[in-house]
Amino acid sequence: MKRIEVKLSLPVVAPLLDLMKASSDVLEAQIAAPITLDDIDADFREEWRAELLAGQQEELHALMGLFNSDFFINGVVAFDEDNAEIIVRACSALRLRLRRHDLSVLEDEQLESGGVDLETLPAALQKPFMCYVFLGTIQELIIQHLDGAILRGPVGDAEPSEDYGADADDFDSEKD
Amino acid sequence: MSDRGPTIARRIEPLLAGAGTRPGLAPEEVALPQSAYAVQGPWRVVVLNDPVNSMGYVVLVFRKVFGFAEPRARRHMLEVHEQGRSVVWSGLREQAELYAFALQQWHLTAILETDEAH
């Protein structure tokens, strides 16, 4: 089974977790992406929303569960075929929330082009932006290394055992 | 209560199980019964651009949900990125709903359209 272990810098990532948790808590009751259900049968919409929300809750619990007591000891988070899909989705949900709520003053073009200089951002935007980039980096790592597992689904077991040691660039200051 | 079965997600499972393993039989190309079209009309699943989800993520989602080969997934992704929207599937209403739901599970902005809406 493919597995990525990412060693993160605790001093960099730990301060982001409060904001991630707060955003995650809001998304317990709110779907992250805008949805339009006008064309869906009226008696079906409530079920539709409820299932989307339940799935989103599960994703966010899985993501926040990575940052457990072990993480605060060794700074390592691990991704594999079992959690790759759910974590990638959780990152998307949180990034949508951060963009809409915390980073709404930024232009779409700034975010899409990556043309945002952290140093020049107002202090109140720096942590949300760090979170946004961090979650995007996690997504990229997973997609780069585990896209096959996601496409195949969590039950695939034919893959030979491999172990990747991936680094999360800006968030890794403790590489060997 | 809906007559669509116990859960939407459970209904999507077989849809996705086939998509991921048979990229040569992308669902958009499956012939649909003309009689069903006559009754319901074709429904389009449209993905709208958002500034958050990365290009790589969107390509992955299209491959996962529809079983598109990478070039086709990339083509739709670029259409979303450059034109603001892409019609990723069209066909019978119920299946269009399932695809839209699957895309929304991945936090993409997906809507349904019919000819009547234009």
Image (cartoon, coloured by chain):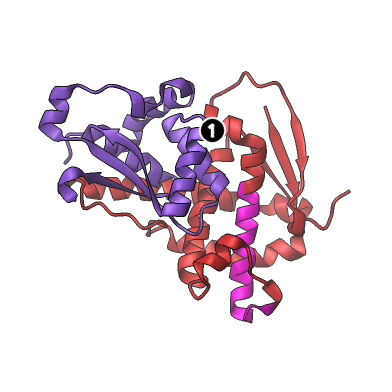
Q: Is residue B29 above or below residue A107?
A: above
Considering every residue shown, the one lying at the far right of the view is: A176
Residue marked by disc 1: B70
Q: Is residue A144 left or right of residue A105?
A: right
Q: Residue at x 42, y 22 (%)?
A: B18
State the image coordinates of residue A158 (x, y, percent, origin top left). Answer: 62, 18
Please tell me which residue lies in front, B112 or B86: B86
Element at badge 1? helix
State the image coordinates of residue B29 (x, y, percent, origin top left). Answer: 35, 25
The colour of chain B is purple
Q: Quadrant of residue A134?
A: bottom right
Q: Is residue B79 left or right of residue B94?
A: right
Which region shows up in magenta? Answer: A120-139
The colour of chain A is red
Q: Residues within 10 Å of mark 1 (few under 14, many from 20)?
A: some
Q: Main secondary structure of the magenta part?
A: helix
Q: Residue at x 18, y 50 (%)?
A: B117
State the image coordinates of residue A156 (x, y, percent, origin top left). Answer: 56, 23
Q: Is residue B80 above or below residue A127?
A: above
Looking at the rendered structure, the kind of residue marked 1 is Glu
Q: Residue at x 62, y 81 (%)?
A: A122
